[in-house]
Amino acid sequence: MKRDGAEKKDKHIERQPLSFLSLVKDYRFNSVLFRSFFLILIVLFCAFFAILFLVISRMDRITDEQVRSVSQSSLSQAADHMDSIIQEAATIAVKLSLDDDIVDFLLADMEDTSENYPETFRAKKKLEDYASIFSYIDSIYVYSRKNDYVVTDTEGRTVQLFQDRNWYDNITERIYEPARMMSRMKYGYYPYLISYIQPVRLTQMQYLGGIIVNIDVDQISEYTSATGDEIFLTVDDRDNVIFSSVEPYRMKKRTELSVLDEYDADGASSQMIEGDGRKLIVSTVDSDVFNWKYIAIVPTAKYQTYRNGLGTFAVRLSVLIVIVSVVSAILIALYSYSPIRHILSLVKDPEQYNPDTSAGFKKDETQVIISNIVHNFYSNHELQEDLSQYLEITNKAQVTALQAQISPHFLYNTLESIRWQAIALSKGDNDVSRTILKLSQLLRISLDNDRSIISLKEEMYNAEIYVEILQLRYKDKLLVEWNIPQQLYNCQIVKVSLQPIIENSVSHGIKPKRVQGVVKISAWTEDRMAFVEVADDGVGMDEEACRRLNEDMSNPYAMREDHIGVRNVNQRLKLLLGEASGIRIFSIKGKGTRVILHFPLTTVSEDAGSQQFDRREHQI
């Protein structure tokens, strides 16, 4: 072969080193090396800083989301605590309103206003028991409208002599309203209280008085988790500030708070606003129990540490990007310039071509350019040798294809010969001959590569052939029921998809039972999808085995020709009918298994499907 001569010619080229300093001297900044370096450096800078910008922007959004999430979570916890406290106060008020001693006090006709009056004494004793339950309860009042008298856990007086009575107008002027809350100051100056007012009626129109449970605001502030500059508010449906963790905002309207001027009450549950010259995060949570909402106001400065860390990270990453970009640009420029240097060395000194020395060039574009001249003279002969090899391979492939065409016919003819011998030996048709006939039909169907997708009617016919073989073997131990609507007969399905499923049901479900089993095949449509179910009443499988098998069904597969089973059918459904197709398996240990094939609902033309079906029946 002359290839050896071509390889010998490769050794004709000798490379002389070319100094970079001489290139710089000759071309200066017009050198391809320098231009490549700066171009690569600019590209790397743009790419890296674009990535840096995206990363920083994303991290900034993540930080903002985390800050909002932390604020919202803290507010939700505080809201739960507040709801629980108010519910406990409401529960106490309701229980007292139903207590016999309290009702006796409200109904009593007291001839004097002495604290030692029996009904007064019993009511006071009852209040003492309830007032000591929770530390945040400042006091509990019971107001008798009939006697215009107030009894507490510590005393009993007429309203005129009772010092703390700024709740009185609320309870007497709104007697027909339900239970409610009000924010007020005890004795008109301190402490701040939240009073839960529970009216007491004997009938709808007979008003007896009310229960007032006073909650100490300072005592419950510790449940709000508000620290430093954080503010926690409770606002009712009339925009009254019922509770505030800071004193200046107590007993006001929400609309009167300058810090919430930019707050949108109908907006998102977490907002970023400007208030009192600061950036604030305002989070809101609706009460799960009462008709009010909780508001948390947190300065963004509280989370400045996160943002400072993000800025430090950005600076460090920028420095690293500059260093990596410069080093990478130098290395890439030098590497990409190397072939040009090799060619220039040959152009500058053509006499370096020496047929008796090795070229020393790397196998790259430079070698292609130089070796092309050396190899040109020998290329025709090499092409002729390659063409001869290709022709030889083609001839072998043709012979193999012809043999492959003969093999199926040989198998069909052999099975048919065995069938007729069985008929001859038994002097008539028998189970063996019928089994061989069905097997021959199945073999012809499986090896028919004309179509991969057929109508459901054809697939039913193919599966029934296999069922007949099984029933020849199992006889009355196997019962197969078909329940497929006729309107689905022209639905497209992958060929040889039901037989493997039925085989699996019999082998792994019915056979281990050792008693008669039933396999039911049914079909239906839903949301432009077709479903075919093969269900058996066999031994089934445990939950873990079923889960693993369904996981296998969801994994991507390549087409396989050496095995047709449940996984293979699932794989072919996905490849031929789309990723929306596949198999789902449901099984209960000891009760049976359901295998459901699902695929897009498409149909073949009725004429084409009938012609193909009739042709296949005729061939078989």
Image (spheres, grey):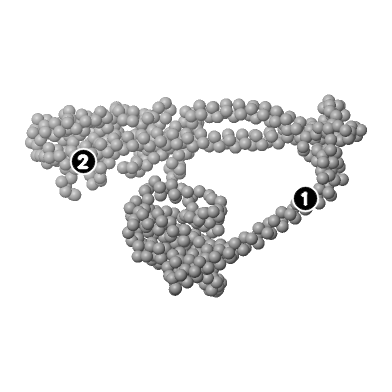
Viewed as shown, does residue 43 lie left or right of 109?
right
Residue at horizontal 47 percent and vertical 35 percent from the top: 66
State the residue in front, 318 or 491.
Answer: 491
- Outermost right residue: 351
- Estimate how packed mark 2 is, as few (under 14), some (14 to 19) or many (20 or more) residues with alpha carbons within 10 Å: some
Q: Quadrant of residue 341?
A: top right
State the residue in front, 424 or 10.
Answer: 424
Locate residue 58, reporting x and y percent: 55, 37
Mark 2 or mark 1, which has the lower sequence index? 2
Check disc 2 and give the amino acid type: Val
Residue that mark 1 sits on = 386
Residue at horizontal 20 percent and vertical 34 percent from the top: 141
Compute the Cα span from label 2 to label 1: 101 Å
- Outermost front residue: 425
Q: Is residue 6 above or below residue 329?
A: below
Position of the N terminus by quadrant: top right
Check disc 1 and give the amino acid type: Asp
State the residue in front, 168 or 43.
Answer: 43
Residue 354 visible to the viewer: yes
Locate residue 2, reporting x and y percent: 83, 44
Residue at horizontal 27 percent and vertical 35 percent from the top: 195
Locate residue 552, reporting x and y percent: 47, 48
Q: Quadrant of residue 215?
A: top left
Residue 275 visible to the viewer: no
Task: Report the disc number at residue 103.
Answer: none
Locate residue 95, reporting x and y percent: 19, 39
Callout 1: SS? helix
Residue that mark 2 sits on = 94
- Between disc 2 and disc 1, the foreground one is 1
